[in-house]
Amino acid sequence: MDNVMKAVRLHAFGGPEVLAYEDALKPVIGAGEVLVRVHAVGVNPPDWYLREGYKMLPPDWQPKMVFPIIPGTDISGVVEAVADDVTGFAVGDEVYAMVRFPNGLNGESRAYAQYVAVPASELALKPAGIDHIHAAAAPMSLLTAWQFIIEQGHEVRNPLQPHPHVPVPLDGKTVLINGAGGGVGHLLVQLAKWRGAQVIAVASGKHAALLRALGADAFYDYRQTKVEEVLRDLDLVVDAVGGPQSRRFLQTLKPGGSLFPIFGLGYDDGGEAARRGISVSTTQVNSNGAQLAQIAPLLDEGTIRVVIDSTFPLGEARRAHEHAAKGNLQGKIVLTVA
């Protein structure tokens, strides 16, 4: 039937075993939307947060959801149909996007599927120089890195802080990236280097060669060295791991420096940052087709490279989530769509 597709759906919250590969209704586009035939899907932490029912969020922050739910946000594919009011995209265009994030936290992004309806404002032409797998791996991780250290590009308030997030100038500055081997971390390294920073990468030892190849000026294996005990006078620390442990980096920063925890939930320094004259700021990544279009030439020419940890067929999303749960990934996991 023309209105049926394959998708990965949840009928209950839980572990990877709740991911069911099955028939689902093909989406119908509304005003301002584009129907994309998906070729690849990027796997991101919010995918398993949703699968688990967002149990890591405070109860009053947990979105109300109705089963069945198709998880996922990041796609690369080919335009199948375009709403009458959409300009700038045509049937047959190769495109990529982060779909409805964070406003689709309740399961409305629906990327783990053969087709997805995407708001045209969140879509961009896929960089011609990379394949669908690498394009699908890029959106959430690269937009997160971009909105943290290059340009936020939106005015959506983050509930974790009262003030807007403002990236700091990077040229000639010394920047430490913690969690540098992961999906967001390896892109932060490259963007900071592109903007003229001296970059210190912190990750497990297996990532050393890759991160030096991506431009890191120095590398520390966190299992061998507690960088907070040996480094001082840094201008910026971007903690791609984040959470309560981010405060340990305050002592590595000079007065006037900045700490950006990517995952800000649970961070509390008890006023230490203010006493040290350090600004702490975080933001929430938001879908942004214009920024993906701005970033596309960097991916196309190889200035920024997205590293692929592994690929799995869409029908084996469960295995992909099991692999992600092992941790210490090098780059991104991608689902391929037949």
Image: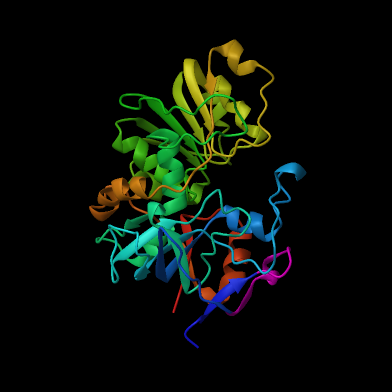
**Residue pictured at 44% horizontal, 61% vertical:** 118
Q: Is 285 left, or right, of 217 in this rendering?
A: right
List x then y, in percent, for residue 321: 60, 64
Residue 47: horizontal and vertical position, in percent? Answer: 59, 58
Tell me if residue 154 comes above or below residue 251 in the rendering.
below
Give the image location of residue 256, x and y in percent: 47, 14
From this viewpoint, is residue 231 visible? no
Q: Which quadrant of the view contains residue 110?
A: bottom right
Q: Position of residue 238 (x, y in %)?
A: 49, 33
Q: Is residue 259 magenta?
A: no
**Is residue 137 placed above or below 116 in the rendered structure?**
above
- Vertical position of residue 118 compared to residue 185: above or below: below
Is residue 15 on the magenta stretch? yes
Which residue is painted at 63% across and 55% down in the image? 106
User: How many badges with numbers are in the image?
Assistant: 0
Question: What's drawn in magenta, residue-wise?
Answer: 10-23
Residue at 40% from the left image edge and 68% from the top image edge: 36
Among all residues in the image, which is located at the extreme right?
59
Q: Is residue 324 left or right of residue 57?
A: left
Display colour scheme: rainbow
Q: Could you say which is closer to the camera, residue 227 or residue 284?
A: 284
Q: Give whichever of 201, 240 is nearer the camera.
A: 240
Question: Relative to 7, is 145 on the left or the right?
Answer: left
* Most distant residue in the left direction: 301
Identify the image quadrant of the C terminus: bottom left
| Residue 84 in sight in this render | yes
